Image: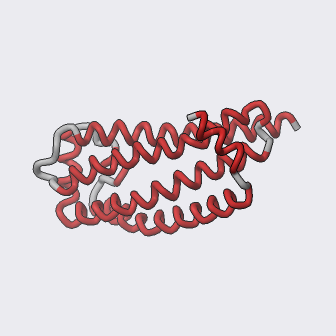
Amino acid sequence: MSVVIQTMKDYSETKIIAVVTTLAIIFTAIVFFLMRPIEQELTTQSVYGVIDLEFAWNVLQMEQILASWGDDLIAMEINAVLLDFGFLIGYSLSLAGITLLITQSGILRSWTNLGYYFTVIPFIAAAFDVIENINLLLILSSPSSFPTFAPFVASVCASIKFGLIIATALFWLLGVSSYVIRR
């Protein structure tokens, strides 16, 4: 890990990072708006949305969600999960880029080294998102006979993913707040 951190310190060009981050944010927004109608359809036709699916935790809860959705909504959610593979690339690049830009700006001072480590966290979150999505696809592609471990694994991975994303945002908030207080 320290080799990755040292490479970021030595070879990261701020303008390139800013451009890549901006493009990643735009890409993330586009994919989000492609996924949004599916979520609206799920919650309009049922009481369950994608967050309910991600945090079903067990077979019984998952079966209730799938029964509520029926074949058409399940097919729509499969498309949303496939789109999420693009979304996770976009959000991980966006979050990492913002973290790296904040870190390189110098406002973090004593937190600079920690900032480089936090730059890697969105990619770890994305890895958990991939595992979550694979388990959700196992469930959605075979709603009557999915592996019993899949809801639990998907929920654990979703919890870790969201925890890491929140940790990254809190790092930004604390770092920028520390800067503002120092000024």
Residue 116 as seen in the image, left or right of residue 50: right
- Left or right of 63, for residue 134: right
Query: Vertical placement of 117 versus 54: above or below?
Result: above
Give 19 or 136, whichever is nearer the viewer.
19
Q: Position of residue 92 (x, y in %)?
A: 52, 51
Number of numbered discs present?
0
**Quadrant assignment, res 71:** bottom left
Most extreme residue toward the top is: 110
Nearer the observer, 107 or 48: 107
Q: Position of residue 128 (x, y in %)?
A: 40, 43
Q: Quadrant of the C terminus?
A: top right
Image position, residue 1 (x, y; %) = 55, 35
Q: Which residue sits at x=33%, y=51%?
A: 133
Which picture quadrant has residue 115?
A: top right
Q: Nearer the viewer, residue 46 or 180?
A: 180
> Which residue reaches farthest right?
183
Q: Who's the residue at 56% across and 37% down the image? A: 167
**Residue at x-position 53% and y-position 45%:** 122
Q: How is the image coloured?
A: secondary structure
Residue at left 34%, top 61%? 82
Q: Nearer the viewer, residue 15 or 107?
A: 15
- In the displayed orientation, state which residue is furthest to the left: 145
